Image (cartoon, rainbow, N blue to C red):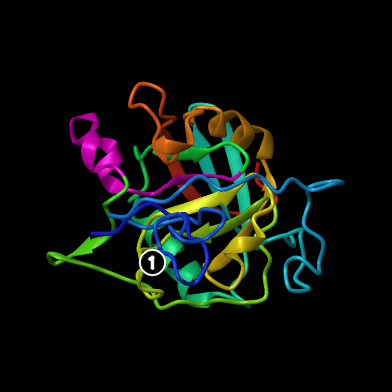
Amino acid sequence: MKAPIFALAGCVAAAFLFGCAEKPEPAASGETTKQPEATKPAEAPKPTEEATGKLPTEPKDGEDVAVIDTDKGKIVFMFYPQKAPKHVENFKELANAKFYDGVRFHRCMPGFMIQTGDPLSKDTGKYDMWGTGGNMVDGKEKFVPAEFTDIHHARGIVSMARANDPNSASSQFFIVTDNAPTLDGKYSAFGWVVSGMDVADAIVKTGPSDPNENGKVKKDDAVTVKSIRIEKWPVK
């Protein structure tokens, strides 16, 4: 199975960050990563059009957005099908199938990101396996081919976790809470948060302060995703 969604440099594993990199990266299931050093933006954290590959940072009326309803509030993000069409399609399919309902933010790293999307995290009895699950279809995990682009992993970017194999993204995804340039070109970014970064900031605080724990959240502290739904902008 896969590991958490932090990924680092090219020589590292695809769990959230690769072991040999200076900073951790999001990982899919099965692997672990070191906690990345924060690279906080000097000014406003909102990505510029340059940071998003010259893509818009505001959705147009009637465009699809994802609404993540959590114990801490709602996070809404827009999609970038222009850059990562397969990842957008995969995410929408899972959300529409209610796949994400009940998952928890199992990996949170202050100064870096928050990760969720593991179906195993719905069950506290499987706590030791949190971070290793994915989208299983007919007994096999369904993967999405890598779509690495020029989008920078700036605060507010939504990207997919994966394991060592670049083509191992499945269901786990992460939201960047502080600029993480070490992830650029190594993870498939497919969205941008348009509202609710204050919620993401509250969720990231559930992560451990000890970097040796690789961001794994205690089961009693993990924030639950009540649902993820695809809605039209503006969200009512």
Q: Which stretch did the figure color magenta? A: 112-130
Above or below, 76 against 184 in this view is above
* Classed neighbour count for the residue bearing mark 1: other residues with Cα under 10 Å, few (<14), some (14–19), many (≥20): many
- Residue 140 visible: yes
Q: Residue lying at the far right in this picture: please name it.
A: 43
Q: Is residue 123 found inside the magenta-colored segment of the image?
A: yes
Query: Residue flagged by tag 1: what amino acid is it?
Result: Ala
- Residue 105 visible: no
Q: Quadrant of the N terminus?
A: bottom left
Classify residue 221 as left or right of residue 179: left
Q: Residue at x 48, y 49 (%)?
A: 229
State the image quarter where residue 94 is shown: bottom left
The residue that mark 1 highlights is 169
Above or below, 26 against 112 in this view is below
Above or below, 150 against 29 in this view is below
- Rendered location of residue 123, percent (x, y): 23, 34
Above or below, 61 against 131 in this view is below
